[in-house]
Structures are given as C-alpha cells and as structure tokens.
Amino acid sequence: MAERHMPPPLRFLLAARRSELQGLEALARTCELVLRISALVHALQKERGYSNLILCSAADRLQPALASLSSEAGAAEADVRALLDGLETDPTAGAGRARLLNCIAYALFRLDELPGLRREVRDRRVQATDADVRFTQAIGSLLAIVFEAADASLDPDVTRILVALLNFMQGKELSGQERACGVMGFTTGWFGDVQKARMLGLAANQARSFAVFTQYAQGAPLDAWDQAQQQDQPVQRMRDMAQHTSDTQRVDSGLAELWFDLCTARMDTMRNVETLLARDLAAQCARRIAETRQELDDRRLLLSRHADHASGRALSLVFSVQSRILDEPPEDGVGNDLERSILDMMREQTLRMQRADEALGNVRGALDERKRIDRAKLLLISRYGLTEQAAHERLQRAAMDAGLSLADVARQIIGQLGEN
C-alpha cells in the first residue's frame, strides 16, 4: 500500500523516521568533509613546519622537500574543494547550517591566500613569525569547520567521535605551533620570557585538549594514543631545556633541527591516531544510516499492512515479538494487539529520541566550553583591539596565573565584559 493512502498518524510516524534518515545522510556528507579537512590540516602543518625551519635557519637543502609538501597540501586542498563544490550545489545543504557554510566561506578565503604565501616563503620575502601566523590562520579556519560539524550533529554516537576528533586535532595543531615556537627559540640559542610563557601555555593547552579526547574516544584510537605517549620523553626534555635558557645561558642553535625532527615524529604518530578516529567516524555514520534505513523499511511494511487490515482490503500476517499472528484474537481474549503495537512503536520512537537528546547533551560539554572560549576572545578583541592570537595568549596567561582552565577564565571574562 502506498504511503499516501495511509491514515495521517501513520504517515507522520514514517515521516519522522524518514526525516531522521535524511539528517543522518546529510551528517555523513559533512563527516566526509571533516575527514578530508583532517588530511588537509595535516599537510598544511607539515608545510608550515618546513617553511618555518627554512625561514629561521636558511636551510636551502630543505627547499625540494618543502616544494613536495606544498604539492601534497595542494592535492589535499583540491580534494576538499571538490567536496565543497558538491555541497554548494546540494539544495538541502544550507538548511539550518548557516554557521557551517559561513565557516567554509572564511576557510576558502584563507586558502586562497596560500599560493601567495608560498611564493613569499620560497623567495624569503616573509618573516618566519608572519608566515607562521598566516599558515596558522588557514589551519584554524579549517578546524572551525570541524567544530561547526560537531556542533550541528544530532546523533550522540557520531557527535562523540566528532568531539574526540576535534579535540585531538586541536591538540595536534597546538603541537605544531609549539614546534614552530621551539624552532625560533632554539635557532637563536635561547628563549625570552614571552617565548617561555608561550611554550608553557601551548604544552598545557595540548594536555587539556588530549584529556578531552581521552574522555570521548574509545577502542583503537585510545589504545594507539596510550602507546604514542610513551615516546614523549625526548620532547619533554627539550621543553625543560628551553625553560632554562637565557641570553647568558645559550644552547647550540643546531638543536633547532633536533627539536623539529622530534616534534615532527610526534605529530606523525598523532596522525595515525587521527586516521583511526576518521575510520571510526566513517564506520559509525554508515552503521547508523544502515540501521535507520532498515528500521524505516520495517516500519513502512508494518504500517502498510496495518492500514490495509484496518481498511478491510487485505489480511495482514503481522507477527508480534511472541511470534503470534497479530491479526488473530489472542487466547486470553485481549484484542487490538496490532493497534497496541503501533502505539508501542510511537512510544518507543519518542523515548528513543529523548534518550538520544540526553546522550547528546552529555557529549556537548566540550563543545560548550569551546564556545565560551571563543566568545571570551571576541570580547577581548572588541574591547581592547587585540588580534585573535593575542586574545588567546591573554586567556592562556590568565589561566596559568590563576591556576584555572581556559574555560573557567573565559567564563569570568564573559561575566565581566559581557555585562558592559
């Protein structure tokens, strides 16, 4: 029986399930974008690292390697743009996702700036600090897309993996920023107070990001991260060394390349964890879509037979969970089993949605913290005319001085500046 001939309550029951399926399919497309962005971010992090090393140490022998990395980043960017073109032509892509599309527009603006930056790096017409900031802005714009994808997800299991992936990618990006800062300091042979504070802040924020990741990750990615952390001792020793340098206590500038190699190996190990998370995300999206499609088919069949039976058009051999034909009166004289089955289905669907909302609320805590931090930075930028990086560093310093988390300091700033 066609759905249009069903009674309105049954049609709307199926429409609800169909809407959920459409939402999952849209989420799967967004998750595919996240996976491609993950690959692009990793490629840009590698390119930024080599650009930084070349600009700091004039290591011309690394120019061929940098050219290769730039080519890899360009290929990864092309993959992202190809998928974005598909989203742009999708008539349903913009429904309720204005913030995500706005983030995509900003990211494309930053990506459009990269060819010019690459020429400046190749010709040494840019300072290492400036190149680092511009690469970091492009990477940050891509991470913002991942955040919006997680924030827009309405499936708790998919959201859990997205939150784990977002925080892991953020921790890895902070590792890349720490690598760049370390290269600059070791190249000069010592770290000033500002550089030392920045190194400490980057290490502390990495720890917080990875702590959130471990809270939401499961299985193979978590096991791989436990193994990867066992190789962190050399990086930690060089962190400690940097804190003990001064203008009168310098170290060999050749340590810059050692630091770079150690951090790069660490980030490559992180990429393996990222890949495992990406696989889990793709598998979970596929699993939820398959389950929802099967449930929709099952319910369409049940409701179609119920409507036919109720209208007298056909007998429906619909079985209950006890394997009894629902259309036949039960021996105990209790009738209307089929109607009760439909009501049970409606109740079950309502309860399942409620449980999903509760589970979703539980995994959104980390996203809410990120929103508070971003709002606090915007308030600092608006009030004091700071750059985004300067606002973030002010938050970091305040958190370190008070012994609080970034989210707690952000809450205080919002309370102080948001009321004025």
Image: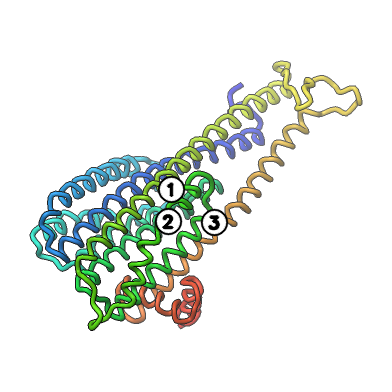
SS type, badge 3 = helix
Disc 2 is placed on an element classified as: helix
Tags 1 and 2 touching, CB below 8 Å = no
Picture quadrant where residue 201 is located:
bottom left
Tag on residue 215? 3
Disc 2 marks which amino acid?
A: Phe
Residue 98 seen by the camera: no
Residue under circle 1?
A: 95
Q: Which mark is residue 53?
A: none
Rendered position, 410 above or below 90: below
Between the C-alphas of marks 1 and 2, the distance is: 18 Å
Marks 1, 2: nearer the viewer: 2
List x then y, in percent, for residue 344: 74, 37
Would you say residue 81 is visible in this rendering? yes
- Residue at the spot x=55%, y=40% of the render? 20
The span from disc 3 to disc 2 (Cα, nearest Å) is 17 Å
Q: Which residue is at a point 45% across and 61% down the rendered structure image?
A: 209
Q: Circles 3 and 1: CB distance less than 8 Å?
A: no
Q: Is residue 209 above or below residue 1?
A: below
Of the numbered discs 3 and 2, the one sitting upstream in the chain is 2
As drawn, 67 above or below 297: below
Q: Please tell me which residue is depicted at 17% across the width and 49% down the height of the picture.
A: 65
Q: Position of residue 192 (x, y in %)?
A: 27, 79
Q: Quadrant of the N terminus?
A: top right
Q: Nearer the viewer, mark 3 or mark 2?
A: 3
First-in-chain label (1 vs 2): 1
- Disc sitting over residue 147 in the figure: 2
